Image: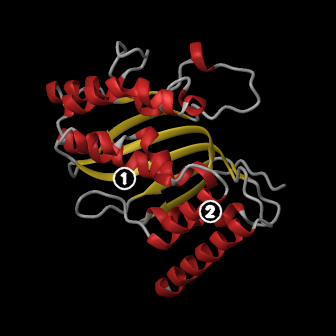
Amino acid sequence: MNRSSTPRLIEAGNLSVGWATIVRELMRPGTRSISPLIFSLVGFDANFDPQETPAIRNGLDQMLGDIGKRDCENVAFTIFPQKHYLLSGGNREAFFELYREAFPRIQELNPRNNRRGSYFQRLVDYEGGNNGLNQLDWILKEYERNPHGRRSKWQATTFDPYRDYSSTAQLEFPCLQQVSFTFSDDDGLIVNAFYATQQIIRKAYGNYLGLSRLGKFMAHEMHLKLERLNVFVGVAQADEAKRSDPHFQALMKIIDVTLDAEATVEA
């Protein structure tokens, strides 16, 4: 198994292509992880949604469904609940209240994955029980009060050592530890996310989609434009992907065709 401590930077103007590039690298003979990985996404459309390639997204969702795993939209929901935001009509306070009130029902529907909370729940109700600190609300109100304040205060955490230190061999949550926000000189918002480990095949696409939506929301509330998403990963893993699995082979064919076409256009 190939191991390296040299950081690998992958910058992309398209979420699907960037994710596919990481997958292709993980599928090199003898490689099961990239450590560390830095994924930097700069491709956002006029509405500040990430650029995507439907063939890759649909191919991944098809494979995930075939093997009984959650699709990209479901994973993205754990970081940013898009449907609750739309139901709130874009009203920030209504959005936070709607989600906090709904989370116990969300938890009941999927107790295995949500037993100890979810990422967005920790961001807006850190201690839980609809009585915890709303970190995003604090950041937004503080930015409105003093947008030029101390740069280190624009951060929110999802990891809680009191609840999350565990000797269990593998935990589904939380791999995302922290999100921070920085600003460019061109009224741009830059989102930085930190993962101890990341399951690239099952989770990463949905993670990047959810983080992009979180960034779009924060940028809108700050009257900025979403400029870049940086994801820092201690260990990026190929998780359950088996090269011999026909479902995964079908996805890799889509990835190879798309990336080869991209390379031809660039050449």
Query: For mark 1, what is the residue?
Result: 228
For the point 43% across and 57% down, the residue is 41
Q: Is residue 63 above or below residue 118?
A: below
For the point 20% across and 46% down, the residue is 224
Mark 1 to mark 2 CA distance (whole Å)? 28 Å
For mark 2, does the 10 Å Cα neighbourhood hold few (<14), some (14 to 19), or many (20 or more) residues? many
Would residue 199 appear left or right of 243 to someone viewing this image? left
Q: In this view, does 186 lie above or below 258?
A: above
Q: Which of 113 and 231 is in front in this view?
A: 113
For the point 40% across and 27% down, the residue is 103
Can you see residue 241? yes
Q: What amino acid is labelled 2 in the image?
A: Met
Would residue 100 appear left or right of 10 to someone viewing this image? left
Q: Could you say which disc has been placed on residue 63 in the image?
A: 2
- Residue 143, percent across and down? 21, 29
For mark 1, does the 10 Å Cα neighbourhood hold few (<14), some (14 to 19), or many (20 or more) residues? many
The quadrant of the image that shows the N terminus is: bottom right
